[in-house]
Image (tube, rainbow, N blue to C red):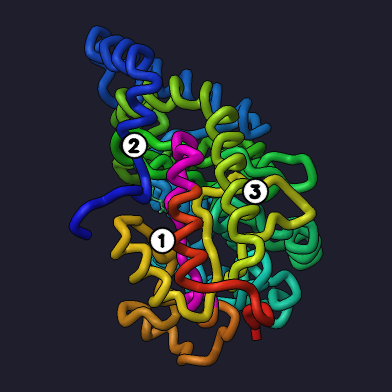
């Protein structure tokens, strides 16, 4: 793109808005020399558990590590099956393979882009151990029917909340609904570190104890390794930065929701489908994703006008070459496959100006035209 007029993300704008607090937090870590775990990370764990409505938070070095350790803490291993979706970031599925278990995929509900609860039961076998719903784009999956199936069939539920910090389901924060939940603090996330980061939240003290040991070489005390663990510890800098940023998260989420409201109004009569906030919860809009039958055309027009966009995700996991051995061919998950062909994410961050939003909407409107019959999900 020759001349970027509206970037997809602007991490610098957010840093500048809180620079003195961040710089002081970094200085605190330098002064203390607690570069790995330490008091800032412990403080963040305390604050993020409170924010998520859980008793426990274990800070890690990525969201992928969070998924891996949550699965291990649930006792999942070779021969076990875990149900999740093909329309997600690849880590949701990859982590199941890290645990040497088998990912069993089910299609999404096209309205919410999250797991279709009515498709779960048919995928359960005697080997199924867990359901891993993904709160995609910042919207909670429909957790009540998922939890009902899990309790009845004695399955563990691990929420993939990597994109959904602060999202709610029927008034409850995501991260507190399943048996464990996994967050990512990758820099572009709604709550982003200045490097890699992740966490597991849970109300189960035993799971928390296991995850805590596994992140630090399986030690129950120094150099006593009771489990075969990993080096998945959070760095001191990230804990200190996340602690500062968490205080601003609600304000930023409201900022995102205000941007979304403007986009929705400006695009209401255009030949695109704007994202739906389901009646069951609070969407935190990690991304603002439109659907349109001419996605590539719309993206090309926006690119030519200096507007950056993203596609989350262009190829569902079951059609990725690296996961061909899961043996799901094209056509297996029509809703996921349609979504992959139709979705386009517009620039979205709390600091995005009304002027920039209007500019993006204007170009989009000219590219797609006014509403004719709505885009089909089928
Ligand atoms: C849905 C989902 N799950 C898991 C992850 C993995 O998180 P991380 O990149 O921190 O390892 C991501 C991150 O992009 C994600 O979007």
Q: Which residue is at the far top?
A: 31
Q: Check disc 3 and report the residue beneath it.
A: 283
SS assignment at label 2: helix
Location of residue 176 by image quarter? top right
Mark 1–mark 2 distance (CA, rounded to whole Å):
23 Å
Question: On the rendered image, what quadrant is the N terminus found in?
Answer: bottom left
SS assignment at label 3: loop
Mark whose residue sits in front, 3 or 1: 3
Mark 2 nearby-residue class (10 Å; few <14, some 14–19, many ≥20): some
Residue nearest the viewer, comparing 247 with 225: 247
Q: Earlier in the sequence, mark 2 or mark 3?
A: 2
The spot of residue 226 in percent (x, y) is: 40, 41
Q: Check disc 2 and report the residue beneath it.
A: 11
The residue located at (46%, 41%) in the rendering is 355
Residue nearest the viewer, comparing 8 with 39: 8
Q: Which residues are magenta?
A: 339-357
């Amino acid at each position: 793109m020759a001349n970027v007029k509206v970037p997809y993300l602007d991490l610098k704008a957010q840093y500048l808005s809180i620079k003195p607090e961040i710089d002081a937090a970094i200085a605190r870590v330098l002064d203390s020399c607690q570069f790995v775990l330490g008091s800032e990370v412990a403080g963040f764990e305390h604050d993020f558990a409170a924010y998520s409505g859980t008793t426990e938070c274990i800070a890690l070095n990525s969201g992928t590590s969070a998924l891996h350790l949550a699965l291990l803490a649930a006792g999942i291993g070779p021969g076990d099956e875990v149900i999740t979706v093909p329309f997600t970031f690849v880590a949701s599925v990859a982590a199941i393979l890290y645990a040497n278990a088998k990912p069993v995929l089910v299609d999404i509900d096209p309205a919410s882009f999250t797991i279709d609860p009515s498709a779960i039961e048919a995928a359960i076998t005697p080997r199924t151990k867990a359901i891993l719903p993904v709160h995609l784009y910042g919207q909670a999956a429909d957790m009540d029917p998922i939890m009902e199936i899990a309790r009845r069939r004695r399955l563990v539920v691990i929420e993939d909340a990597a994109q959904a910090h602060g999202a709610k389901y029927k008034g409850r924060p995501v991260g507190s609904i399943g048996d464990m939940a996994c967050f990512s603090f990758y820099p572009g996330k709604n709550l982003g570190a200045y490097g890699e980061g992740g966490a597991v939240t849970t109300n189960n003290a035993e799971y928390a104890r296991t995850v805590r040991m596994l992140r630090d070489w399986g030690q129950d005390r120094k150099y006593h390794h009771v489990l075969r663990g990993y080096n998945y510890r959070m760095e001191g800098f990230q804990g200190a930065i996340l602690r500062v940023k968490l205080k601003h998260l609600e304000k930023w989420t409201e900022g995102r929701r205000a941007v979304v409201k403007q986009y929705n109004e400006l695009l209401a009569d255009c030949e695109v489908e704007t994202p739906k906030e389901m009646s069951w919860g609070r969407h935190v809009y990690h991304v603002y994703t439109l659907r349109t039958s001419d996605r590539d055309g719309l993206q090309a027009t926006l690119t030519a006008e200096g507007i950056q966009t993203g596609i989350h995700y262009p190829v569902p996991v079951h059609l990725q070459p690296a996961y061909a051995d899961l043996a799901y061919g094209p056509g297996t998950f029509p809703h996921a496959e349609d979504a992959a062909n139709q979705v386009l994410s517009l620039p979205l961050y709390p600091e995005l100006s009304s002027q920039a939003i209007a500019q993006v909407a204007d170009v989009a409107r000219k590219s797609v035209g006014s509403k004719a019959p709505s885009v089909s999900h089928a």
